[in-house]
Image (spheres, rainbow, N blue to C red):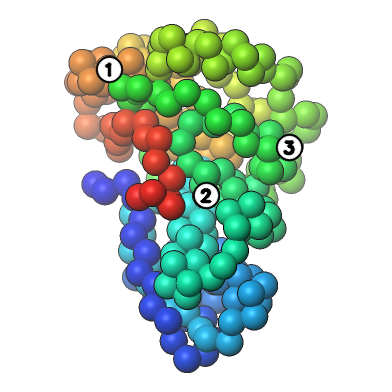
Amino acid sequence: MRLYDKLILRPRRSGIKILCKSKRVPLDQGNICYRAAESLLATVGIKQGLEIEIQKNIPVGSGLGGGSADAAATLIGMRKIFDIDISFLDLSKLALGLGSDVPFCLAGGTALVRGRGEKIVPLPPLKDGWFLLVDPGIPIFTSWVYSRLKGKLTKKRLDIKLVKELLKEEGIRGVNKFPLYNKLEEVVVEEFPALREIKAKLIEAGATGALVTGSGSTVFAVAEDQEKVTSILAKLGRKLRVNAVRATDKSVKEA
């Protein structure tokens, strides 16, 4: 399975049109790509319209940021095809109005994100890093998770200097030197205990760390190298839908 979406942008005389075969992807203003196009066109005063064809492969409601990445790609693509003179900083500010994850998707690479998503601290790339992504096929809406969230999102602030040193010296192995934590996970595992079971299976199979991604429902696990990936996959069997992916330092503006 190709775990990435593909977008094709086509200028049109007026209006915004979304094309997508997935029935779970809205074709109106409920689509974040629609809002991204609408916002940028209005900001720069372009009267033309845009057709956006989305070839969807990233599961909807999986916590993998597919919609945010698509919105970022829409902004970057529009800047190119309409030859829009807008700085990356201004584009990032516009992106923040679309969603907290969109500015990061514009910047790409490995980073520590703080605030509402506007504070992005670049980190050393995760060289030779592998992750296993388990998709349980349970769509979870972020708004639902936040409506049930109690308390702060983080336990304590990470030492950025220490994180940078660990990632630079040890790569993916450095990730395991600081605790993996996701406050949103507490909400989703209570409602969907199957996610807790998936985490346990990944750890039992040899993963050095596992966590629900964002608001879920995907569970990711850290694997040091391809040999470890092969070993874990063999122990998990075929009952779970698992994707083995490598870390990348590219952003949508470079892809």
Q: Mark 2 points at which residue?
A: 106
Q: As displayed, is residue 19 above or below residue 154?
A: below
Precedes in sequence: disc 2 or disc 3: 2
CA separation, marks 2 and 3? 16 Å
Q: Name the residue under label 3.
A: 115
Q: Nearer the viewer, mark 2 or mark 3?
A: 2
Q: Give percent across and percent down for residue 215.
A: 58, 40
Element type at mark 3: loop
Precedes in sequence: disc 3 or disc 1: 3
Q: Residues within 10 Å of mark 2 (few under 14, many from 20)?
A: many
> Which residue: 34% across, 18% down?
223
- Specify the amino acid type for callout 3: Gly
Out of 147 and 108, give the one closest to the viewer. Answer: 108
- Specify the amino acid type for callout 2: Leu
Precedes in sequence: disc 2 or disc 1: 2
Q: Give percent across and percent down for residue 254.
A: 38, 49
